[in-house]
Image (spheres, rainbow, N blue to C red):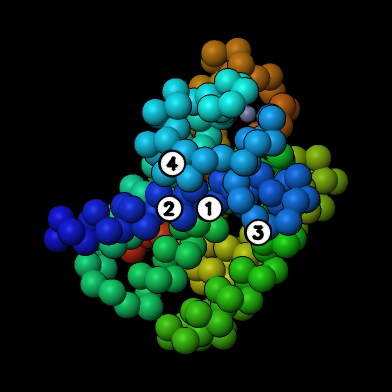
Amino acid sequence: MIVNLAFFFLLGIIFGSFLNSLIYRLHEKLPLGGRSFCVFCKKQLLKRDLIPLLSFLYLKAKCRFCREKISWQYFWVELIAGILFILVFLKYENLNLFLARDLFFILVLIFIFIYDLRFKLVLDQLVFPVLIIATLLNFILGFTWLDLLTGILIGGGFFALQYLSSKGRSIGLGDIKLGILLGGMFGWQMIILIILLAYLIGGIIAIILLINKKKNWGDFLPMGSFLAISAIIVLLYGELIWQFIYNL
Ligand SMILES: [Zn+2]
């Protein structure tokens, strides 16, 4: 068991490291291949500086060459991916296609969370390929087309209605695309839960920020990031949450 947990943690931090690089390269419109380099001085990183988590701590969050401060995002994304990979493994406790799908979904959701938080954007390059892969995987895993289509309609329709009623002020086109994507990834039952939970999380965070005077009413809040957090919770514990609701 310990070996399994260690394996999934390692796998998670390695993919987390890959995600950090992907986020940077997609945003800067750089080629996706090639060696990693410092974003400030552009010097190629040494092999020993590419170890997830450890290199960052050893270098005290600074570039080896130019000593510029490197964002803590690099560390946190790796660590959180590692922890979430363990939690997904614990959900199934054996190797199967469901596990592989959920690990893939976790990476997609971390990507969406960071990208919307930092750049206020949901990328088409991500949404459409993932939607196709996710619906195909789900179909293989026993979802019906009706289930997935209903999920897509609920997810997309919910945000499209808000987009129209607010004339695009509170909800962007990116949120509609994200609603469609999450509908295809999770099906109709879970997308409802994801939307409810996202508003709950968003509401709580908005109130905390307002009380601390960090934001004013009407300031932008990253809906995509709230949806991503909510989807991660539902991915891990959605069935338990539904059970809890039914028991009420
Ligand atoms: Zn540097």
Callout 4 crowding tier (Cα within 10 Å): few <14, some 14–19, many ≥20:
few
Callout 2 crowding tier (Cα within 10 Å): few <14, some 14–19, many ≥20:
some
Q: Secondary structure at mark 1?
A: helix
Q: Nearer the viewer, mark 3 or mark 2?
A: 3
Quarter of the view holding residue 214: top right
> In the image as oriented, which residue stretches furthest toward the left?
1
Label 1 belongs to which residue?
Answer: 18
Q: How far across and how far down the image is residue 108, in percent? A: 55, 58
Label 3 belongs to which residue?
Answer: 33
CA separation in Å, label 3 and label 4: 19 Å
Q: Along the line of sight, which residue is nearer the eye, 88 or 35?
A: 35
Left or right of 75 in this view: 160: right
Q: Secondary structure at mark 2?
A: helix
Which sits earlier in the primary sequence, circle 4 or circle 2? 2
Badges 2 and 1: C-beta atoms under 8 Å apart?
yes
Which sits earlier in the primary sequence, circle 1 or circle 4? 1
